[in-house]
Amino acid sequence: FRRPLGPLELSFYWDACFNGVAVLINRLELEATQGLEDELLAEENVRRAWLRMKQRFPLLGATVEELPGSEKVEFILRESALHTLRPGEFNILDDLETLEDALRYSEKLQTENTVLDNNNLARVWIARQKGSPRTLHIFIPIMHFITDGIGNAAVERELCQEISRLYKDTTVNVPPLPARIQALLPVEAYSPAMKLSLPRRRWRSAIAKVIDDIRMKKLSGGQTLPMLPPVPVGTPPRSRTMGSPLSAALSRKIAQGCHALHVTLSSALPVLSEIAFARVLHRLRSKGQISDEDWEHRRRQPMHFAGPINYRPYLDRGWLRAGGWNEMCIAISYYNFVLPFMPTSSALDETGAPSFSALLSPERFLARARIAVAEAKYQLTHPLIDEFHLLLMPKRSKHRRATAMAWRARQVGKPLPEDAPRPSSFEAWAPYVVANGGASLGNRDLIIPHEYPLPPSKNSPKPPTRIHLRVAQHDMRCCTGELYLGAITTRGVLAFFSCIDENTFDTEMAREWTEEVKNAALYYL
């Protein structure tokens, strides 16, 4: 079975061609029940579980191929590939002695050369931790063009389920691949607009383009954190993820604060980011690291924000009922909106930054958060949401492909293509400067349970626990020039995190910004 990559998949495929940009890195830490560890955590059991996973999620066993003489790329799926392991697909680590070793290996997968290619869209490494025989670490890098946050959760949850069940058979009772093709189409194929006649779809696309052109012409300016000197075109990004967790009590406080203000954390996040920008930039100006001219320019700029959204709720209901809610695929789209210029104040504390009360009152914070709420509602309920998605993807693909081609040219010493993008440019195809990308990943405990096996249905009694999922960590190899802000809740603990390209942004400055986001959340929420 062959099929072309859809518009969304193709844009992330070209990301991956640039030394594994946007590859998702999953790290699981499993603890087996006392007395069952040798059977549950045995290499053979995990290997069988992975083979069963490939049959349940066929894209794990797919390959991709660029068609000569064109820009088309196709998936290739073979039934036989779902029942066998390719060389290097399933790997054992023998030298993992401590948790710190596990963290270092996860960081290695995130920061060093990519371990995936067109013949290996996902790979697995497992390691029994020496001195802790009941602990198993699993590392699963997956190409972003076959999965997203929901898809990753499905992979992690179902892999834990497969391991805990101790199946001896490597074959899963699912329909053969030809019968499942309809569920493996590009996400755009499940758009409700696809049920309309071709003339009507063309008419809707034309209207969407006019609206989008008008909107884009109104967007300009913007600012982000000060950037480092540009690196040569085609230099791959250096990913770094930094987290700033809160206590369980403070996490509850913020959740209650959002509820009381009738805003979601996703809506509050851009405003918190803007306030954090202001405090960091005030300190830089106090130290003389920002000129008066640059400061005057920055304080007059609107603040542009962008990020991913879960596209599944807007897709075909029949596909969702048939399993699309939990299918391993990429089903995201994007939002973007603008907030007023960052707040400033002349009343500075001993660190050179204004206090939160001097910078922005709680009432003005809420007003800005409501701007984000209203803009999100406008974009997510717009009747042409699918058409806007289809307009964006070719622009994104064009930029990403140009970046990948520049990388390939550098690898073989060829001249750079004429359309090679300028370096250190986050979303360079946009006519404005994005402050940062980002999104809240919500409460992951709702979609990734901690104890396995799971009951067969909601009303079934809970079976005895065999596997405890102690850690489910998610990282990403960031894009060139990326500054990403996120929030995630696990085990009742909220953590803010940032993912940056260290070739573009100073690590300590980004860390300070992330901490200020957390501090702002504690003050305003």
Image: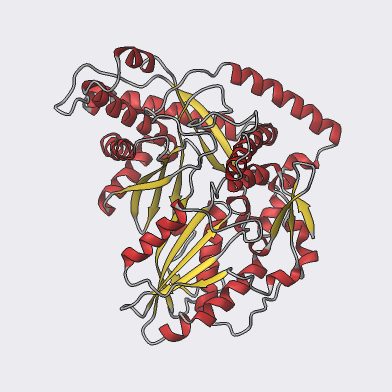
- Which quadrant would the C terminus be assigned to in this image? top left
Q: Is residue 446 left or right of residue 285?
A: right
Image quadrant in which you'd find residue 205: top right
Q: Is residue 259 left or right of residue 434?
A: left
Q: Identify the residue at the far bottom of this view.
A: 35
Q: Identify the residue at the far left of this view.
A: 350
Can you say whether 63 is above or below 82 in the image? above
**Foreground: 219 or 410?**
410
The reply to whether residue 516 is in sight is yes
Residue 179 spot, x, y in % from top left: 79, 65
* Residue visible at 56% across and 51% down in the picture: 148
Residue 156 spot, x, y in % from top left: 51, 64
Residue 462 spot, x, y in % from top left: 47, 76
Can you say whether 361 is above or below 439 in the image? above
Can you say whether 425 is above or below 183 in the image? above
Residue 100 spot, x, y in % from top left: 32, 63
- Which quadrant would the N terminus be assigned to in this image? bottom right
Can you say whether 219 is above or below 383 in the image? above
* Residue visible at 64% across and 68% down in the picture: 54
* Residue visible at 49% across and 48% down in the picture: 477
Image quadrant in which you'd find residue 147: bottom right
* Residue visible at 56% across and 64% down in the picture: 123
